[in-house]
Structure formats: C-alpha cells, structure tokens
Image (tube, rainbow, N blue to C red):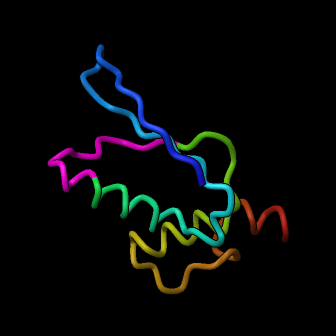
Amino acid sequence: MKAMGASIPEKGITQVGMSVYMPEKTPLYRVFELLKIEASRYNVPVLSSEVVGVWPVQVLIDVVRYYLKVENLDRSKVLEVALYEG
C-alpha cells in the first residue's frame, strides 16, 4: 500500500490518495475506517471517496457486506457475475 496527501487550496481541502495493491489481504473497508479514525483525530471530515481503475468483484462484495451488513451476499448474487459465469 502507498499513500500520499496533497493540499487543494482552490477547494479548501486536503486529498489523501492511496494505492492498495493487495485488497484481498488489506480489505478496503478497513483502510477506509482507519482513514476516518485518523481524520477524526484532527476533527477533519471525510467528504468523499472515489475509485480509480477496476476492482475484483470480491473486494466490492466485502465492502457491501461490511457497510450494509448483508449476510448472504456472494458472487452468485451479483448480476454481472451471474450473466458472465452463467
């Protein structure tokens, strides 16, 4: 994993950029939660996030399971996966 910070004065914000090279070993929801914890230490809100590039479907399933508490979500319940593998 690599991370960097950059001030964007015209927007009045600081951006944190991260590259997660092995999301199956370092789940993205953990990375995001730790980022929010660190930001809150400085009373800084996390305003948004973005995805650059493509992610493995299992990574997205793990994020949905964590934040939405979906217990029975697996690859077979993702429409595009079902169409592709079906």
Q: Which residue is painted at 40% across and 78% down in the image?
A: 69
Q: In the rendered image, which quarter contains the C terminus?
A: bottom right
User: Magenta stretch: residue 45 in it?
Assistant: yes
Q: Which residue is painted at 74% across and 65% down in the image?
A: 81
User: Magenta stretch: residue 31 in it?
Assistant: no
Q: Quadrant of residue 76?
A: bottom right
Is 2 situated left or right of 7 in this image?
right
Residue at the extreme left: 43
Q: Position of residue 70 (x, y in %)?
A: 45, 79
Residue range in magenta is 39-50
Q: Position of residue 71 (x, y in %)?
A: 48, 85
Q: Position of residue 44 (x, y in %)?
A: 20, 44
Q: Quadrant of residue 48?
A: top left
Residue at the extreme top: 10
Observer-nearest of 67 and 25: 25
Observer-nearest of 47 and 70: 47
Observer-nearest of 9 and 71: 9
Q: In the rendered image, which quarter contains the N terminus?
A: bottom right
Observer-nearest of 46 and 67: 46
Where is 47 relative to 59, above or below?
Answer: above
Where is 31 relative to 77, above or below?
Answer: above
Q: Which residue is painted at 28% across and 61% down in the image?
A: 37
Where is 14 relative to 22, above or below?
Answer: above
Q: Which residue is painted at 24% across and 22% down in the image?
A: 12
Main secondary structure found in the magenta portion = loop
